[in-house]
Image (spheres, rainbow, N blue to C red):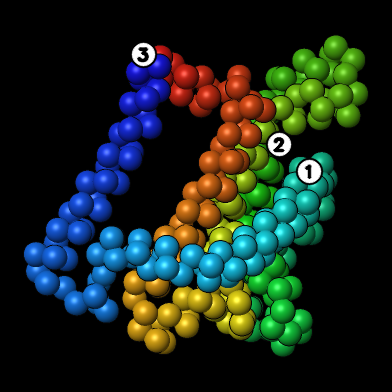
């Protein structure tokens, strides 16, 4: 129990030291508030503008989640199809790479032209940014099953569906969750990028407004909220990973480290 408590306290202590240095440094060097506000000033502004941050925040969260789950619903079946058919893999991979290489900030204005300034363009940008890691990591996981294991399964009379269900899918889960965690952080950036291009609500829009009005404290508060959203979503996925694949070496290593 003490080891687990220490695992929680140590990161919090590190953040506290960083904030303390920030606070003392700004006050000691008399840095103007419009240039770099203190953490306490940022907290005051966040509490003062709580309703504004909340109203804009849930819109960004909705855009992020919608784009993310769209990427999961399309990316995972696509990875399964790519690993099931070599010809399909050769057919779809160049197109997928093309859309990944194209800068999303360049595609976002096209979505505004096609779909207007509503919520759809932001969802699509979040989808595009989070889509590629899910597909690639899932495909790598599905291909990670060794030929010897496949031969063993076939020698035991396992059908192709049984091999996928009992061997390929469990083997791919650690890779899938790795892609899901990467995509969880990218989805937040995708929603904000979409709001930068054209929006009248959302935390990305709020960042633009605070920047133009030189409201630096509120700008920092908005960045903190975006960071917290990404962290919470990341750790939710990590928690689900610990529930679904407790047998994997990464999860066992965490448990062994906590009990040492």
User: Dot 3: within a 10 Å radius of its alpha carbon, few (fewer than 14), some, or many (20 or more) residues?
Assistant: few
Q: Nearer the viewer, residue 157 or 69?
A: 69
The residue that appears at 40% across and 72% down in the rendered structure is 219
For this orientation, the residue located farthest to the front is: 48
- In the image, residue 113 sits, relative to residue 179, either above or below, namely below
Q: Is residue 178 visible?
A: no
Residue 171 figure quarter: top right
- Expressed as whole percent of the image width and height from the top left, the position of residue 200 reads 61, 82
- SS category of the residue bearing label 3: loop
Q: Is residue 139 visible?
A: yes
Mark 3 and mark 2: Cα distance apart in space = 33 Å
Mark 1 and mark 3: Cα distance apart in space = 39 Å
- In the image, residue 169 sits, relative to residue 128, either above or below, namely above
The residue that appears at 72% across and 79% down in the rendered structure is 118
Q: Which mark is residue 80?
A: 1
Q: Nearer the viewer, residue 3 or 140?
A: 3
Q: Which mark is residue 260?
A: 3
Q: Is residue 79 left or right of residue 206?
A: right
- SS category of the residue bearing label 2: helix
The residue that appears at 78% across and 51% down in the rendered structure is 73
- Mark 3 vs 2, N-terminal side: 2
- Mark 2 vs 1, N-terminal side: 1
Give the residue pinned by disc 2: 142
């Amino acid at each position: 129990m003490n080891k687990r408590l220490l695992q929680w306290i140590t990161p919090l202590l590190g953040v506290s030291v960083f904030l303390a240095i920030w606070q003392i440094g700004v006050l000691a060097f008399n840095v103007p508030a419009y240039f770099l506000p203190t953490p306490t000033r940022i907290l005051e502004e966040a509490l003062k503008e709580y309703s504004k941050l909340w109203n804009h925040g849930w819109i960004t969260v909705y855009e992020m989640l919608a784009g993310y789950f769209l990427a999961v619903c399309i990316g995972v079946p696509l990875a399964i199809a790519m690993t099931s058919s070599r010809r399909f893999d050769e057919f779809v991979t160049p197109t997928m790479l093309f859309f990944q290489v194209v800068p999303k900030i360049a595609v976002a204005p096209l979505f505004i032209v096609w779909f207007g300034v509503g919520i759809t363009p932001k969802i699509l940008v979040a989808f595009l940014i989070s889509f590629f890691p899910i597909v690639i990591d899932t495909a790598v996981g599905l291909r990670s099953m060794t030929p010897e294991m496949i031969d063993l399964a076939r020698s035991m009379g396992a059908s192709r569906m049984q091999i996928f269900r009992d061997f390929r899918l469990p083997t791919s889960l650690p890779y899938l969750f790795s892609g899901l965690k990467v995509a969880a952080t990218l989805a937040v950036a995708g929603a904000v990028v979409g709001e930068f291009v054209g929006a009248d609500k959302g935390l990305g829009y709020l960042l633009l407004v605070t920047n133009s009005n030189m409201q630096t404290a509120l700008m920092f508060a908005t960045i903190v909220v975006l960071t917290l959203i990404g962290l919470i979503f990341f750790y939710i996925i990590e928690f689900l990973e610990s529930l679904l694949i407790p047998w994997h070496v990464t999860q066992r290593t965490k448990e062994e480290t906590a009990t040492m």
